[in-house]
Amino acid sequence: MKYQEWLDSLNPGDKWVSVTGGRGSSYFVATYEVVRRTKASIFVRRAGTDAPPTRFNLKGNEVGGRGTLRPPATEEQVVRAYHHNDMYRLRTKLACFDWASIPEGTLKEVANILGVIYDGK
């Protein structure tokens, strides 16, 4: 289904999962729902929240803003986003880890596993 066809088919109560972001950081995965639809606008908010809805025109552009209404993500995109987020968190934890607290022998073992070359090798 093309983007405009999808927009035209949206009705109050419709929900979908969307994925945004991911450029060097984590992806944002959220479920959205149509709250209201008029002749000129679609009102959408994150599902399960009491946040005020965001208003979009019938072309999917945010009214009074710069955002666009994101289409549904495929299952593969959602899985890939969650995997990317897991790896991003792991890299962050490793970068912030207190490596000085690791005994020398263990640290050398970790370096060998990672293929890190150090002066002692």
Image: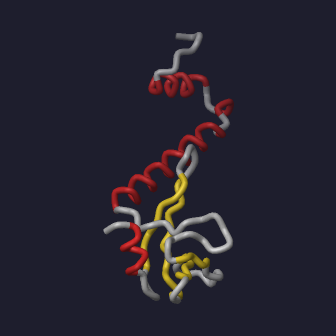
Residue placed farthest to the left in the image? 1
Q: Position of residue 120 (x, y in %)?
A: 57, 11
State the residue at coordinates (44%, 69%): 17
Front residue of 41 and 36 = 41
Q: Position of residue 25 (x, y in %)?
A: 58, 47
State the residue at coordinates (62%, 37%): 95
Question: Does residue 34 sit above or below 21 in this rendering?
Answer: below
Tell me which colouring the rendered structure shows: secondary structure
Where, by quadrant of the figure, is residue 62 drawn?
bottom right
Where, by quadrant of the figure, is residue 97 drawn?
top right
Front residue of 114 and 38 = 38
Front residue of 76 and 82 = 76
State the residue at coordinates (48%, 61%): 19
Question: Does residue 67 sit above or below 25 in this rendering?
Answer: below
Q: Position of residue 9 (x, y in %)?
A: 38, 80
Circle count: 0
Front residue of 70 and 47 = 70
Q: Quadrant of the N terminus?
A: bottom left
Relative side of 117 to 54, left or right:
left
State the residue at coordinates (56%, 48%): 89
